[in-house]
């Protein structure tokens, strides 16, 4: 799997999905707030410049090295930990069923 670049993020996600959705749902141009984490592609200069040119999109600030504020990440972490501890032919089916 290849990592997404900031250019791909701009083209495929912000311009290809988010902006058309916002323009359709909020045709009056009212500001829309969304969340993105501190990923390199989210903090890239070209991403920040693009967002500055689209005033209707407001990205919330995400604390640097802050606690993970997405609760599902904790669930995934727990699941991965449990499955990692059961990497045997006998253990994996048991946890998969659970």
Image (tube, grey):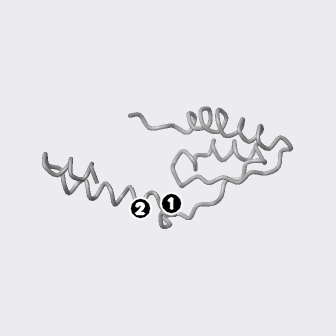
Horizontally, is 90 left or right of 81 in the view?
left
Residue drawn at point x = 72 percent, y = 53 percent? 58
Seen as rendered, the residue at the extreme bottom is 67
Horizontal and vertical percent for residue 52?
A: 73, 47
Residue at which label 2 appears = 74
Residue drawn at point x = 64 percent, y = 36 percent? 17
Q: Hey, which quadrant is residue 80 in on the image?
A: bottom left
Horizontally, is 47 left or right of 83 in the view?
right
Q: Secondary structure at mark 1?
A: loop
Vertical side of 80 occupied by 44: above or below:
above
Q: Residues within 10 Å of mark 2 (few under 14, many from 20)?
A: few
CB under 8 Å between callouts 1 and 2? yes
Residue drawn at point x = 44 percent, y = 38 percent? 3
Vertical side of 68 occupied by 55: above or below:
above
Residue at which label 1 appears = 70
Q: Residues within 10 Å of mark 1 (few under 14, many from 20)?
A: few
């Amino acid at each position: 799997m290849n990592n997404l670049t900031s250019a791909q993020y701009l083209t495929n996600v912000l311009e290809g999905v988010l902006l058309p959705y916002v323009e359709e749902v909020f045709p009056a141009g009212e500001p829309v707030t969304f969340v993105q984490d501190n990923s390199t592609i989210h903090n890239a200069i070209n991403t920040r410049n693009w967002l500055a040119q689209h005033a209707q999109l407001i990205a919330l600030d995400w604390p640097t090295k802050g606690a993970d504020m997405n609760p599902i990440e904790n669930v995934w972490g727990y699941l991965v930990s449990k499955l990692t501890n059961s990497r045997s032919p006998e253990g994996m089916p048991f946890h998969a069923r659970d």
